[in-house]
Image: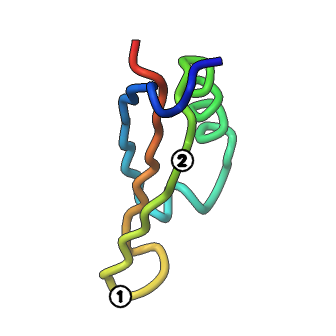
Amino acid sequence: MTDSIDTEWEYKIIRTSDGGLFSGDTGPMEDALNSLGGDGWELVDTISDSRGAGAGSGQTALVFKRPQS
């Protein structure tokens, strides 16, 4: 295992609308997350932007990282 102090990371940010992420069938999102995990990406944070007028009006950014190759 590499020492986290010496590890250089690359990041990926995926934006999705709250309605698409939190409603309906979760299968497609699970498939996408499993695919990203298979490529070495780890979900490290979510950032919600709800500046709109209530639930489902904002976006969520999913932040992933993996060791840089």
Residue that badge 1 annotates: 53
**Coordinates of residue 59 in the picture (x, y in percent):** 38, 64
Amino acid type, mark 2: Val
Q: Where is residue 23, by image quadrant?
A: bottom right
Residue drawn at (32%, 82%) of the image: 52
The vertical placement of 27 against 68, above or below, is below
Quadrant containing the C terminus is top left
The vertical placement of 53 against 7, above or below, is below
Which dot marks residue 32? none
Q: Nearer the viewer, residue 34 or 9?
A: 9
Residue drawn at (31%, 81%) of the image: 51
**Coordinates of residue 19 in the picture (x, y in percent):** 49, 64
Residue drawn at (44%, 46%) of the image: 63
Residue that badge 2 annotates: 44
Amino acid type, mark 1: Ala
Q: Where is residue 6, by image quadrant?
A: top left
The reply, left or right, for residue 36 in relation to residue 49 is right
Query: Distance of mark 1 from mark 2, alpha carbons?
Result: 27 Å
